[in-house]
Image: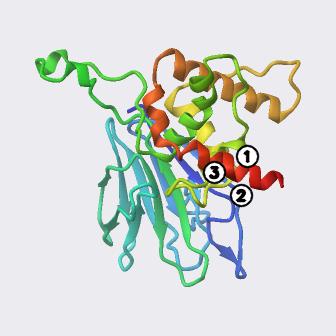
Amino acid sequence: MSGVVVHLPRGSGGTDGGAPCGDPVTLRLGPGEVARFGRGSATVPVELRLADAAISRLAGEIRVRDDHWQLTNHSSTHSYLVENPEGAGEYLRVAPRRVGAPVPFEFSRVVLPTRGDVPVSFQVFAPDHVYLDPDAMGVPWGNHTVTAYSLDETATYFLVLVALCEPRLRDQSRVAVPTTPQIVERLRSHPACGALTARAVSSHIDYLADEKLRIGVLDDPAEHGKGERRNGKREEIVGLALRFGLVREEHLALLPPLTVARGRERQAER
């Protein structure tokens, strides 16, 4: 595990006078590194500032280990929740004063209690969970190999990856990679993706490129628009996934029936 990514979305860091406030923050932590979170102050610096008055100056910390990350709760009264957004309600509770609670989820949402209506939360991605190569099972432990690209086929980001690859898997030609709105529409009838937004799809694409597939898309000086760069990123993702067989024809069964998607497209055109 090379590290974790901690992300505080815009407006998720608490409230100021009842209104959500705060710019988005993204931290990258390697093994052995620590990020503290809380309200902070001049004498209590924190890497992740959560502005809600119900949160302590130093509320807790994230510590990255070689193969997992840990959450420490500095509060003496409040428990914190670590939710698995893709685990059908799966969560763990970190009790007050708990030190170094190990978190097993690949994608987590840390939620802190407040007195307001807007929850205070941030996300933690642990992108390098390692899985044994199924073809190597049964051999002596010292000879085990691990997969080069660690992908969870039950995760939403994998559905996005399959949707990106679908046209080329079905057509076997150099057809255009789907746009973000097309992916949203393609997955809308999936039970886990009814509330999927274009912003969420873009985040999943960035996660695939930057953390799971480790694609470095160089900016072309001739490309001045963000849309062109993102399209290049999608092309790189699809190319790598198909070349290495990370997405295959059998994975198309994970997507909603194509007839349903096409029916929705026809209704939209009327």
Q: Alpha carbon of mark 1 to alpha carbon of mark 3: how far?
A: 11 Å
* Mark before the other along the chain sequence, 3 or 2: 2
Q: Is residue 244 left or right of residue 21?
A: left
Q: Does residue 215 appear in this view?
A: no
* Mark before the other along the chain sequence, 1 or 3: 1
Check disc 3 and report the residue beneath it. 200
- Between 210 and 54, the residue placed more toward the observer is 210
Q: Quadrant of the C terminus?
A: bottom right
The x and y percentages for residue 122 are 54, 59
Q: Alpha carbon of mark 1 to alpha carbon of mark 2: how far?
A: 25 Å
Q: Nearer the viewer, mark 3 or mark 2?
A: 3
Query: Does residue 227 lie above or below 184 as drawn?
Result: above
- Between 84 and 135, the residue placed more toward the observer is 135
Helix or strand or loop: what does disc 2 sit on? Answer: loop
Query: Does residue 246 lie above or below 87 as drawn?
Result: above
| Residue 115 found in image quarter | bottom right
Residue 17, numbered label: none
Helix or strand or loop: what does disc 3 sit on? Answer: helix
Residue shown at 30%/55% (left/top)? 100
Most distant residue in the bottom direction: 115
| Residue 188 found in image quarter | bottom right
Q: Is residue 12 left or right of residue 256?
A: right
The x and y percentages for residue 257 are 54, 45
Q: Quadrant of the N terminus?
A: top left
The x and y percentages for residue 56 are 50, 73
Residue type for callout 1: Pro
Residue type for callout 2: Asp
Check disc 1 and report the residue beneath it. 181
Crowding at mark 3 (Cα within 10 Å: few <14, some 14-19, many 20+):
some
* Mark before the other along the chain sequence, 1 or 2: 2
Check disc 2 and report the residue beneath it. 23
Q: Does residue 245 appear in this view?
A: yes
